[in-house]
Image (tube, rainbow, N blue to C red):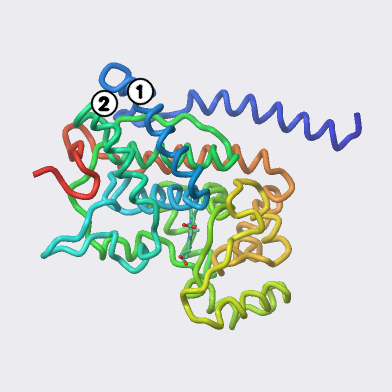
């Protein structure tokens, strides 16, 4: 066995041990692994089925389901506030600028409909988002992690709540670190969760500034192809990496070749605070998977409603009357 192979086996073993520890890791008091064991025993199976059917028809939805959970948890905690529709006297998060390109709402609605048919009024929309994101990642060949359940749905959803809570695609890593820190995620979590960009696409509106201002940290051939994509205007789009429907470590390898799409992606490799983490993930995708699972488990427990706070929505896009 070569030294490189030995090293790889050792890292694999280390990860297995750590995964076992992570499975028993801290879970917020409100959540538990068998939360719906008595009230909706097939809940996870139902979610997995609907997600599977949706991804068979459109594999790009894996990215969208993952992003929905992220945008839910960062604004007011994981309470499905991102799913609520605007009303006559309130503009909801869903209609905020940062959420304009969210997709996958119809998959969440189908899951909820299937759950309501089996066990009405039991499974929260916030839990549906957490499970759908986990299943989407796994079906895109990413890691599988346990999702403790029992989140409750919120009744508030206001567009302005997204302004400071969701990170903008800028290159200032200090600001990005601060935004993640506010919800209890550290620098390592930030870099690992940014690896969510191993899936999906961004529109020219999100990266055109990088095309103009960051020539030194942008690979020439990528700059050329993005330039032609964006000739048609802000609605052109490009994948985050070469394998945008497959959850893998290619995103980090692209960053080390200066082929990051957003300024906020590339800056992770350019900034001293995060360069080493990016290089490690680029060389060792298993370690990225492990760090991503840990990050997702933390993200899925941000600012949960306590006790009787909130509700279990009957329909995900409107609060119960
Ligand atoms: C570090 C801070 C982050 C910033 C600045 C950021 C920003 C963005 C932007 C600007 C887009 C493209 C929007 C568009 O042009 O349509 C996007 C897409 C996406 N983001 Fe992030 N993001 C961040 C972190 C995350 C995290 C933590 C996750 C998940 C764990 C995530 C998952 C995704 C996915 C999967 C997409 C593609 C969605 C699709 O194709 O439908 N992002 N992000």
Crowd class of label 2 (few under 14; some 14 to 19; many from 20; radius 10 Å): some
State how far apart marks 1 and 2 are (Cα): 9 Å
Q: Which residue is mark 1?
A: 42
Determine whether, in the image, residue 227 is placed left or right of residue 299. right
Determine whether, in the image, residue 228 is placed left or right of residue 170. right
Query: Residue at 41% of width from left, 27% of height from top?
Result: 45
Query: Residue at 50% of width from left, 25% of height from top?
Result: 23
Q: Position of residue 147 (x, y in %)?
A: 42, 31
Mark 1: is the Cβ under 8 angstroms from ligand 1? no
Q: Position of residue 279 (x, y in %)?
A: 71, 53
Q: Position of residue 261 (x, y in %)?
A: 59, 67
Q: Is residue 18 above or below residue 280?
A: above
Tags 1 and 2 touching, CB below 8 Å = yes
Hey, which quadrant is residue 151 in on the image?
A: top left
Which of these two is toward me, 222 or 150? Answer: 222
Query: Residue at 52% of width from left, 38% of height from top?
Result: 294
Q: Quadrant of the N terminus?
A: top right
Identify the secondary structure beneath mark 2.
helix
Residue lying farthest top?
38
Hey, which quadrant is residue 97 in on the image?
A: bottom left
Q: Is residue 204 above or below residue 94?
A: below
Q: Quadrant of the C terminus?
A: top left
Identify the secondary structure beneath mark 1.
loop
Q: Which residue is mark 2?
A: 118
Which of these two is toward me, 127 or 45? Answer: 45
Query: Residue at 51% of width from left, 32% of height from top?
Result: 145
Mark toward the viewer: 1 or 2:
2
Q: Earlier in the sequence, mark 1 or mark 2?
A: 1
């Amino acid at each position: 066995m070569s030294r490189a192979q030995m090293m790889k086996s050792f890292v694999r073993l280390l990860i297995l041990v750590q995964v076992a520890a992570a499975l028993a890791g801290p879970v917020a008091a409100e959540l538990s692994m068998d939360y719906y064991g008595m009230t909706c025993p097939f809940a996870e199976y139902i979610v997995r089925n609907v997600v599977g059917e949706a991804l068979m028809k459109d594999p790009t939805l894996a990215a969208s389901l993952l992003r929905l959970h992220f945008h839910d948890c960062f604004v007011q905690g994981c309470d499905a506030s991102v799913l609520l529709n605007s009303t006559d006297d309130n503009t909801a998060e869903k209609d905020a600028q940062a959420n304009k390109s969210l997709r996958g709402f119809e998959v969440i609605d189908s899951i909820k409909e299937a759950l309501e048919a089996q066990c009405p009024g039991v499974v929260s929309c916030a839990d549906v988002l957490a499970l759908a994101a986990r299943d989407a990642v796994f079906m895109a060949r990413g890691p599988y992690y346990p999702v403790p359940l029992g989140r409750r749905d919120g009744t508030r959803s206001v567009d302005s709540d997204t302004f400071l809570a969701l990170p903008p695609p800028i290159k200032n890593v200090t600001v990005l670190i601060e935004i993640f820190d506010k919800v209890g995620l550290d620098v390592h979590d930030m870099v690992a969760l940014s690896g969510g960009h191993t899936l999906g696409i961004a529109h020219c509106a999100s990266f055109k500034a990088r095309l103009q201002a960051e020539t030194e940290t942008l690979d020439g051939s990528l700059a050329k192809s993005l330039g032609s994509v964006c000739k048609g205007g802000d609605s052109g789009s490009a994948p985050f990496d070469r394998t945008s429907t497959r959850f893998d470590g290619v995103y980090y390898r692209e960053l080390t070749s200066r082929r990051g799409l957003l300024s906020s992606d590339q800056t992770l490799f350019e900034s001293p605070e995060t360069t080493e983490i990016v290089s490690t993930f680029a060389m060792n995708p298993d370690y990225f998977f492990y760090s991503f699972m840990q990050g997702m488990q933390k993200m899925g427990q941000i600012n949960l409603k306590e006790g009787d706070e909130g509700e279990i929505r009957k329909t995900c896009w409107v609060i119960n009357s």
